[in-house]
Image (spheres, grey):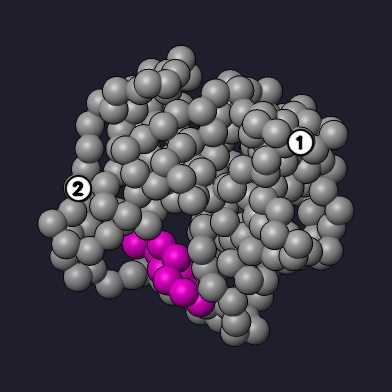
Amino acid sequence: MGNGTSIRVFYGASQADGDASPARVITNSPVGGNTGSLFLDTFHNRLYVGDDTIGVRVFDNASGINGPTASTRLVTGFGTVFGVAVDTTANDILYVSNRDGAGSYQISVFTASTANGAATPSRTITPTGLSNVNLSVGGISLDAVNDRLYVAGATNATVMVFDGASTANVNGQIPPTRTLTFPNTISSVVIDAVNNRLYAVSLGAIYILNNASAATDPITVTGILALSGGSFTAVAVSP
């Protein structure tokens, strides 16, 4: 769980309730930045932290680190980072949704295991609408088995779907394969590929969409999780 400049780790998460204390707290060393998004690569025991203002911090030995910890690698060169996703198959791809210094929204693509410093992306996916309008991006989620990337619209009520994510698009500008429109602005998404179910997060609700791989507008959400107070910022799913 990201909490500003720290990452709180809870064991027995499926049983946790109430004001639970974290088993470990990982803090940035040196101090700075803000933890905005996370991706845990369980196969390589590696944690990717999308730091809103600094870049993408990569921590090896994720299951064993605790306290002030310097990231193993720090990928920089972004304006603002919104989300991270990793293809842990043989493709070995890191996707970073971001806005550059000029205000352009994009998804920068790197080799996950080696990206470091002010790395040049191997590709840049620039979501594009009618009349070549640059579409905003927020949190992202990857169905690696089906090579499909889901991207929150961030400033609107849409989720963009990009098929063939591992090869799209050397030239940058690309329209989404499909666009799914929800009742409210969507800030982040999670795809449960095992059950083909998409979770789309807005401030007041989490929308659940079954059969996500085939869904097209107009969609009918399967379920809605709502709060009586407060707001949602993210979701994680254990299928």
Q: Position of residue 239 (x, y in %)?
A: 35, 33
Query: Can residue 17 be seen in the rendering of this structure?
Result: yes
Residue corresponding to mark 2: 226
Task: Tell me which segment is drawn in magenta.
Answer: 1-12
At x 67%, y 44%, the residue is 134
Q: Quadrant of residue 29?
A: bottom right
| Camera-side residue of 225 and 17 | 225
* Residue type for callout 1: Gln
* Residue type for callout 2: Ala
Residue corresponding to mark 1: 173
Considering the numbered disc 2 on the image, is that residue within a helix, a strand or a loop?
Answer: strand
- For the N terminus, give its image quadrant: bottom left
The crowding category of the residue bearing disc 2, from other C-alpha atoms within 10 Å (few below 14, some 14 to 19, many at least 20), is some
Q: Position of residue 25 (x, y in %)?
A: 44, 74
Q: Is residue 160 left or right of residue 226?
A: right
| Camera-side residue of 96 and 221 | 221
| Camera-side residue of 147 and 134 | 134
Query: Can residue 236 be seen in the rendering of this structure?
Result: no
At x 35%, y 22%, the residue is 219
Magenta-colored stretch includes residue 14: no
Furthest toward the bottom, the residue is: 31
**How many labels, in total?**
2
Q: Give yes or no for contact between labels 1 and 2 (Cβ–Cβ under 8 Å).
A: no
Where 91 falls versus 38 (above or below)?
above
The crowding category of the residue bearing disc 1, from other C-alpha atoms within 10 Å (few below 14, some 14 to 19, many at least 20), is some
Considering the numbered disc 1 on the image, is that residue within a helix, a strand or a loop?
Answer: strand
